[in-house]
Amino acid sequence: MLGGLGKLAAEGLAHRTEKATEGAVHAVEEVVKEVVDHAKEVGEKAIADALKKAQESGDKVVKEVTETVTNTVTNAVTHAAEGLGKLGQ
């Protein structure tokens, strides 16, 4: 009789251990999922920020080049007009 009780107790202990292990595994899975999700969000934000900065830098470069070309062309046209004016005198 005690042998049967011992076996029953061992089975009960094994069942509780299995359930506890399943619970622990589930908890770890949830933590890992949260960490991965957070890392994904941080990575996406970092990429978006980098792209935004690159776009802003690109916009700044385009603006500077446009201003430089405009000034250069304006100066060349002014110089040419002045030269033509001197020829006409």
Image (spheres, grey):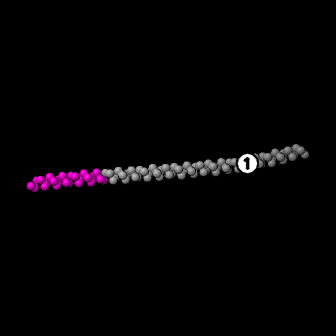
Please report the residue visible at 17 percent of the width from the left and 53 percent of the height from the top: 80
Please report the bounds of the magenta region as a residue range. Answer: 66-89
Q: Residues within 10 Å of mark 1 (few under 14, many from 20)?
A: few
Between 42 and 33, the residue placed more toward the observer is: 42
As drawn, the residue found furthest toward the left would be 89
The image position of residue 32, as x and y in percent, is 62, 48
Between 62 and 14, the residue placed more toward the observer is: 62
Choose top left, top right, bottom left or bottom right for residue 85.
Answer: bottom left
Kindly identify which residue carries mark 1: 20
Q: How many marks?
A: 1
Please report the residue visible at 27 percent of the width from the left and 54 percent of the height from the top: 70
The image position of residue 23, as x and y in percent, is 70, 50
Please report the residue visible at 48 percent of the width from the left and 50 percent of the height from the top: 47
Please report the residue visible at 57 percent of the width from the left and 51 percent of the height from the top: 37
Left or right of residue 80: residue 9: right
Between 8 and 85, the residue placed more toward the observer is: 85
Which residue type carries mark 1? Ala
Q: Is residue 13 magenta?
A: no
Q: On the rendered image, what quadrant is the C terminus found in?
A: bottom left
The image position of residue 16, as x and y in percent, is 77, 48
Q: Is residue 79 magenta?
A: yes
Between 82 and 18, the residue placed more toward the observer is: 82
Determine the secondary structure under disc 1: helix
Left or right of residue 1: residue 58: left
The image position of residue 66, as x and y in percent, is 30, 53
- In terms of secondary structure, what is the magenta stretch mainly? helix
As drawn, the residue found furthest toward the right would be 1
